[in-house]
Image: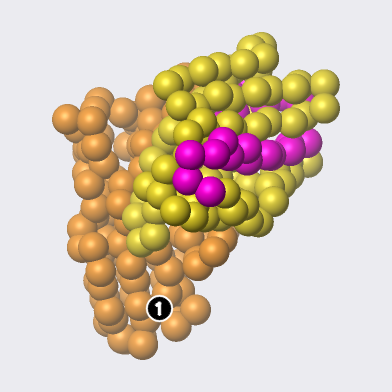
Amino acid sequence: DTEVTQTPKHLVMGMTNKKSLKCEQHMGHRAMYWYKQKAKKPPELMFVYSYEKLSINESVPSRFSPECPNSSLLNLHLHALQPEDSALYLCASSTSGTPGGEQFFGPGTRLTVL
Amino acid sequence: GEDVEQSLFLSVREGDSSVINCTYTDSSSTYLYWYKQEPGAGLQLLTYIFSNMDMKQDQRLTVLLNKKDKHLSLRIADTQTGDSAIYFCAEGVNAGNMLTFGGGTRLMVKP
């Protein structure tokens, strides 16, 4: 299995909803990432987990809450989002601790906040 | 500081070669990557080059690296309509595998 999967593919939510995005990989990678991508822009790093521990939080608002239940799964819990949070949310994984290890991306979840 | 720049747009005819350029500023980069993103999809890793290499070829793709000028290019031979996408270059600057992306180049291939 050489892919990163993400669910759901599309999500529409109101500003008072709570929802979660899910990411899964079975490549034995020990680093997993969340990125946010707005239209016609490059991905922006949000969080990095290394060996199931949060290693980087790029000053992301607390309405985004990541969770790494095990080495294969990564969640992003969403609560009280704003319309400007609408974007493509991408998950990626890589072999942790290896300089220059390439990141493999999932297909993304297209989030719309009404 | 880290800054990766690309031209916004490139249009070529089917069968021609495409050359997408990228410049970066961080001389400590160890790997440089090219990713492809089709509409509504995630990023697909196309190829990468280690910073001590000048060139890497992989089927229709050729990556050239000029480390002195901090210039990276991706050449796609015999460009097809299926190559139409946004191409991002990215540099990896430390052991944490953090990537800095360029703004992306939209490649349009005309039949």
Quadrant location, the C terminus of chain A: bottom left
Please tell me which residue is depicted at 54% across the width and 64% down the height of the picture.
Answer: A40
Tell me the residue at 39%/60% (across/down).
B39
The number of numbered badges drawn on the structure is: 1
Please give the name of the residue rendered at 27% of the width and 79% of the height, measured from the top-left corner.
A12
Residue A24 coordinates in the image, percent (x, y): 22, 44
The answer to which quarter of the image holds residue A111 is: bottom left
Depth check: give the residue in front, A25 or B24: B24
Query: Residue A80 location, x and y as percent?
Result: 37, 80
Res A14 seen here: yes
Q: In this orientation, which residue lies closer to the viewer: A72 or A44?
A: A44
Q: Judge the density around disc 1: few (<14), some (14-19), many (≥20) Cα neighbours within 10 Å.
A: many
Q: Residue furthest top?
A: B52
Say what amino acid the circle numbered 1 marks.
Leu
Query: Can you identify the residue that label 1 sits on?
Result: A81
> Residue A55 location in percent, x, y?
47, 40
Instruction: Specify whether residue B27 is painted magenta.
Output: yes
- Colour that chain B carries in the picture: yellow
Which residues are drawn in magenta? B13-34
Q: Chain of mark 1?
A: A
Q: Quadrant of residue B70?
A: top right
Indicate the secondary structure of the residue bearing disc 1. Answer: loop
State left or right for residue A64 relative to residue B87.
left
Q: Which residue sits at x=59%, y=33%? A: B74
Colour displayed for chain A in the image of the structure: orange
State whether residue A55 appears in this view: no
- Looking at the image, residue B42 lies above or below residue B45: below
Q: In the figure, is residue B53 to the left or right of B57?
A: right
Image coords of residue A90 (percent x, y): 38, 53
